Amino acid sequence: MAIAFVFWACSGSKNTPVPTPPVTTTPIADKNWSFETSAYFADEFDNTGKPDAAKWGYDIGAGGWGNNELEYYTDGSNANVANGKLTITAKKESMGGAGYTSARMVSKGAGSMLYGRVEVKAKLPSGVGTWPAIWMLPDDYSYGPWPKSGEIDLMEMVGFDPNVVHFTVHNQTYNGANGKGAGKTIATASTDYHIYRIDWTPYAIKSYFDGELVYTYVNESNGFATWPYDKKFHLLLNIAVGGNWGGQKGVDDTAFPASMDIDYVRFYKMIDK
């Protein structure tokens, strides 16, 4: 299932593109890479209070984020850790010209990676107009502005289509409504925790929901136009409100406050061969 109207990355692409690299002509072989069993970056959210500042930063502000979203992302007042979980809460309140507030947490720096396994255990919000996401963007826009430098969506769900979760990749060739991915119905996505995971190697990006393989995006070996995923990426956790996709059926203000709970985040390094 293709995902339409995913344009978050546009707002962060201010880097000057580097010259186009040579196109790969030799197909990438699947070496059946494995992954370390100890996480090199993890947050179990065992503290109390604000998320660990050594692991997490924030994208801040309003302006639609290139996608006509309605929220103002705060510097952490919409994110809290307690009882072994991180809670990101979208609220119906005015700030910075927006009618809602939320949080968009980023792991850039300590939680940046090139190839590996990313695993997040989460319980999603509900309500028309909510748009939770667990996703990845490049640290540097080496191949140019979105979508050229890529995006990896581990999980997205829109509140008007409850319990249907989506995995998608975006790049110069496949993006927006033509992004490559798949969807799956998880009947308890908003009432129970589920595990969203990717296994990312030079050969492919594989998506798993609760350990079930749902999609494999294979490196076509023709350069960054389809495979910009040879650079470091970092994780983002957020709840958007409205937007080109999330707001297609309007926004139900009675759904707020709406929260996404994260039990843990874990990154495992790929074992090279």
Image: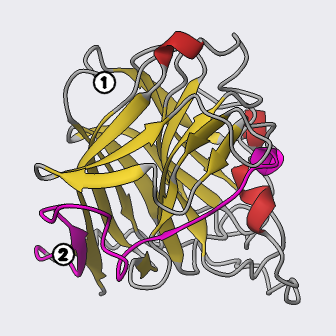
Find the magenta span and give its range.
37-66
Q: Is residue 225 visible?
A: no
- Identified by mark 2, the residue type is Ala
Is 92 placed left or right of 200 in the picture? right
The colour scheme used to paint the residues is secondary structure
Q: Is 147 located above or below residue 240 in the figure?
A: below
- The quadrant of the rendering that contains the C terminus is bottom left
Q: Which residue is painted at 47% across and 84% down in the image?
A: 109
Q: Are marks 2 and 1 in contact (CB under 8 Å)?
A: no
Circle 1 is placed at which residue position?
A: 189
Residue 207 placed where, x, y %?
39, 47
Q: Can you say whether 141 is above or below 83 in the image?
A: below
Q: Which SS type dominates the magenta stretch?
A: loop
The residue closer to the viewer here, 124 or 102, is: 102
Residue occupying the far front of the picture: 94
Q: Quadrant of residue 149?
A: bottom right
**Label 1 sits on what residue type?**
Ala
Q: Where is residue 36 shown, x and y percent of the image?
A: 17, 77
Earlier residue among tags 2 and 1: 2
Q: Residue at x 39, y 53 (%)?
A: 79
